[in-house]
Amino acid sequence: MTDSRDPAVYDHVRVPDDSGASVSDGGDTALSPGTYRVVGVGEGTVTLLRVGDADGYRVNTGEVATVARETVEGFDPADNPDGNRPLGEKARRFAGSVVWNLRAFVAGLVARPALAAVALALVVVGHQGHRVLSVPESWLTAVYFLGVFAVVYLGARG
């Protein structure tokens, strides 16, 4: 936090495991341990959004709590948990993203099968046409790139 007496929006605080901090509207509900982002500051209250678990990893709970300003002053400042994902998780998410993008691309081609077949035929003729056609190499290169651009366009636009 910028100052322990002055929490600001987007500051991050850590609620310790043994904290007895309670939500000010109900009073009975204790805050879950973890990292919270300050999303609102009132006269005597601070609104917090839970963004990290007790281990400091990013979570998406949607858990919002309003606590007394004095309560937040007792919490420790914390780092933003958005950038601390393990390498394995980042690689898994990247692979999942590639798979979904590939599925969307194929779905775009399947949406217009006749045009996709023509585009793929242009790619094949441009790439392998020198074996059966006696045309200048520059023509085959142009046909190849025209086919590639057509496949990309159809895959991206459907």
Image (cartoon, rainbow, N blue to C red):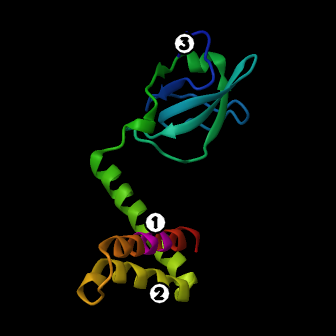
Q: Counting other residues with Cα less than 10 Å from the Cα at mark 3, is it few (<14), some (14-19), or many (20 or more)?
A: few
CA separation in Å, label 3 and label 2: 60 Å
Name the foreground residue: 131 vs 103.
Answer: 131
x and y, in percent, of residue 59 in the image: 48, 45
Position of 24 with respect to 78 (left or right) is right
Task: Say which mark, if any, is on residue 2.
Answer: 3
Q: Disc 2 or 1, which lies upstream in sequence?
A: 1
Give the main secondary structure, helix, strand or loop, of the magenta stretch. helix
Q: Residue furthest right?
A: 43
Q: Disc 3 or 1, which lies upstream in sequence?
A: 3
Q: What residue is pinned by disc 1?
A: 101
- Residue type for callout 1: Asn
Residue in the image at 47% along x and 87% along y: 117
Residue in the image at 70% along x and 30% along y: 24
Residue in the image at 27% along x and 90% along y: 132
Q: What residue is pinned by disc 2?
A: 117
The image quadrant of residue 139 is bottom left
CA separation in Å, label 3 and label 1: 41 Å
Total marks in image = 3
x and y, in percent, of residue 17 in the image: 43, 32
Name the foreground residue: 131 vs 53.
Answer: 131
- Residue type for callout 2: Ala
